[in-house]
Amino acid sequence: MSKSVIVKNVTKKYKLYKKTSEKLLDIILPKSYGEDFYALRDISFEAEEGDIIGFVGVNGSGKSTLSNVIAGVIPQTEGTIDIKGQASLIAVSAGLNNQLTGRENIELKCLMLGFSKKEIKELESDIIEFAELDKFIDQPVKSYSSGMKSRLGFSISVHTDPDVLIIDEALSVGDKAFADKCLDKMNEFKSRGKTMFFISHSIGQMKQFCEKAVWLEFGQIRMIGSINEVIPEYEKFLNEYKLMSAQEKKDFRDKALQRQSEPMLSL
Ligand SMILES: Nc1ncnc2c1ncn2[C@@H]1O[C@H](COP(=O)(O)OP(=O)(O)OP(=O)(O)O)[C@@H](O)[C@H]1O
């Protein structure tokens, strides 16, 4: 098997400012203003062709940030990501221009991926049919429900045949029938040996679909392995986490963030 995605020492740092003036000072003065916040810290793992990897973790653990960084939607602050081929992100709000119609979004996304006008015309009807948008396809996307946006995003992504597919909570907003249709399409991709990353708060969907899992905790990898190893440990943690009081959750989070902000030791 050959490697399709290599994520090496990836860190994503944000600056948190208390006021806009702090942000301005940070830009114009050499002294640093604002507080560093690590949404991802020193993430490394590799995926093989045909791997289906689930990202799990409680809210704010960095799943979407990691998806966006792998898809090239946002840049990492440090580290490298090597991808064999083209990656495509499917997320509820990803990649659609709200001012354009559904049809214009199809054209724009396909043009950006290097398809010719003729190829786009050939793909268009399949994309619209799969997305079940019918007459709404010529309405601006800003008038779409979150389910409609998700269906359009999913349909464009799967029909442009990416090598690496990243699905971030995109199935959670549609209805069951559409989710089943998407799962069928994802299974087709799986049988064709594509690499996929899958994020869902549904542990059932994770177990059904993924073979491996990366458990993120406040921007760092807590565990990585087969789905059968990681999910039981994650569920055990979730049961304990759910029982924590708001203060205990805050202490747990503060401790993790404290560990995270300590300087990293290099080996
Ligand atoms: N643009 C930004 N500026 C500052 N902090 C950000 C930014 N985007 C994300 N973060 C922070 O990074 C952390 C990770 O966020 P992310 O959305 O990746 O988590 P998640 O695991 O996908 O959460 P959820 O399950 O709620 O979707 C959060 O604490 C979030 O507040």
Image: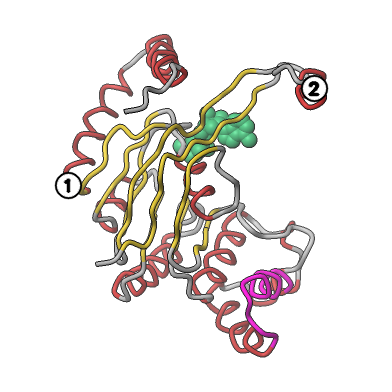
Q: Check disc 1 and report the residue beneath it.
A: 228
User: Dot 2 lies on which element?
Assistant: helix
Q: Is residue 214 above or below residue 167?
A: above
The C terminus, quarter of image: top left
Give the magenta part as a residue range.
Answer: 104-117
The residue lying toward the viewer, choosing from 152 and 144, is 152
Q: Is residue 102 above or below residue 51?
A: below
The N terminus, quarter of image: bottom left
Was residue 107 drawn as part of the magenta stretch in this picture?
A: yes
Display colour scheme = secondary structure
Mark 1: amino acid: Asn
Mark 2: amino acid: Thr
Q: Is residue 104 above or below residue 216?
A: below
Going 70% across and 69% down the picture, which residue do you hit? 105
Going 56% across and 24% down the picture, which residue do you hit? 37
Q: Position of residue 101 (x, y in %)?
A: 75, 68
Tell which residue pokes out farthest to the front in this image. Answer: 267
- How crowded pointer 2 is (Cα within 10 Å; few <14, some 14-19, many 20+) is rated as few
In the picture provided, is 237 more to the left or to the right than 117?
A: left
In the picture provided, is 177 more to the left or to the right than 232?
A: right
User: Which of the 4 quarters of the picture holds residue 59?
Assistant: top left
User: Dot 1 lies on which element?
Assistant: helix
Q: Check disc 2 and report the residue beneath it.
A: 20
Q: Is residue 222 above or below residue 68?
A: above
Q: Is mark 2 within 8 Å of ligand 1?
A: no
The residue lying toward the viewer, choosing from 172 and 3, is 3
Going 42% across and 67% down the picture, which residue do you hit? 182
User: Which of the 4 quarters of the picture holds residue 189?
Assistant: bottom left
